[in-house]
Amino acid sequence: MTYKLGLIGNPIGHSLSPWIHQHFLESADLDGEYKLYEGDFEALPQVIQRLKDEQVDGFNITVPYKQVIIDFLDEMDEEAEILGAVNTVVQKNGKWKGYSTDGEGYVRSLADIFPNLLTSDASVLLLGAGGAARGIYRALMQKQVARLDIANRSLEKAEALLSLRIGNASTSVISFEEAEAQLAEYDLIVQTTSVGMKPHQDVQIIRLDNLRTGAVVSDIVYQPIMTKILQDAKSRGAQIHHGHAMLLYQGQLAFEKWTGKNLEVSHLVDQLEKKLRGEIN
Ligand code: ATR
């Protein structure tokens, strides 16, 4: 068969997903295409019609459709239901089922690079409480970490994340100032806000003066690849984890849902970095 895959959202002209999924199709020795279906918020019904007419096998969803797509689905995976957001749809026998691969994709990317990090005595600090943070919060909780604190500009929004808790991890909502003061208590710091993203790459969400030696600092922002907080962490001798790794592993998980193929993708992390830097096509 020839897989018909794609991405819906706006703007998506510079998306790396076609590059990623073309590599996956080739590695899996499958025929297929991954097309972009761009449309603004009001155009969703037309975008949906195109996907139905073309009988796509699956597609990814990005801004601004991650929540509103739910109205067009036949079924929802439990995790996507809890998060209230969908970034992957699988078509089977004409029915559409929605999934969220943000959290698990993130955790997979981290676990592949730092296999001993997410243990039952790990202490984690999550920076941010938006859509991306919600999925990551759940996925880290599922890994049974010991402690998972949330720091966010709006404490109310961070409090709202607590309703998503599972497992026994201790979790507190703290301010950025408190996070800076007690930074040495964490093995992993996960930056999920948009702070540091191009064109505002000169800002950093918190200071790292108290960072513990050997800690891992992870940023889901991948434009630029080396965000200010990652540069700072590296200069202090910490280990760093880049945002483009999450993008790749999210794709791996979506591809698995569409095709049933579980691909080894770690060798593509460096390739994707080169692609982002414009060094390869
Ligand atoms: P996403 O789906 O990408 O996570 P989002 O749901 O809009 O996007 O969430 C954005 C996150 O970045 C939030 O945690 C937001 O903080 P608030 O909840 O306080 O709004 C955070 N954020 C964005 N701009 C920020 C800034 N200038 N300073 C601090 N936090 C910021």
Image (cartoon, rainbow, N blue to C red):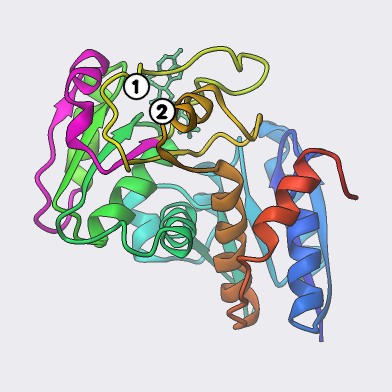
For image coordinates 49% across by 58% down, the residue present is 109
Callout 2: SS: loop
Q: Nearer the viewer, residue 52 or 213?
A: 213
- Vertical relation: 252 (above or below) 132: below
Q: Check whether the beta carbons of the residues at disc 1 and disc 2 lie within 8 A of each other.
A: yes
Q: Is residue 60 above or below residue 58?
A: above
The quarter of the image that holds ligand 1 is top left
Q: Along the line of sight, which residue is nearer the eye, 108 or 96? A: 108
Q: Alpha-carbon distance for marks 1 and 2?
A: 8 Å
Q: Amino acid at mark 1?
A: Leu
Q: Which mark is residue 236?
A: 2
Is residue 49 visible in the rendered image? The answer is no
* Quadrant where the N terminus is found in the figure: bottom right
In the displayed structure, does residue 214 sit left or right of residue 68?
left
Which dot marks residue 208?
1
- Quarter occupied by residue 179: top left
Crowding at mark 1 (Cα within 10 Å: few <14, some 14-19, many 20+): some
Q: How far across and how far down the image is residue 27, in percent?
A: 76, 77
Q: Residue at x 17, y 23 (%)?
A: 174
In-image side of 269 versus 216 (left or right): right
The residue shown at (50%, 20%) is: 195
On whether ligand 1 comes within 8 Å of the CB at mark 2, the answer is no
Q: Which residues are magenta?
A: 165-190
Q: Residue 66's spot in the image, x, y percent?
A: 54, 44
Asked whether residue 170 is drawn in magenta, I would say yes
> Which label number is shown at residue 263?
none
Nearer the camera: disc 1 or disc 2: 2
Q: Residue at x 41, y 66 (%)?
A: 77
The picture places residue 123, in percent across and down from the top left corner, at 19, 45
Toward which corner of the image does residue 121 lie, by quadrant?
bottom left
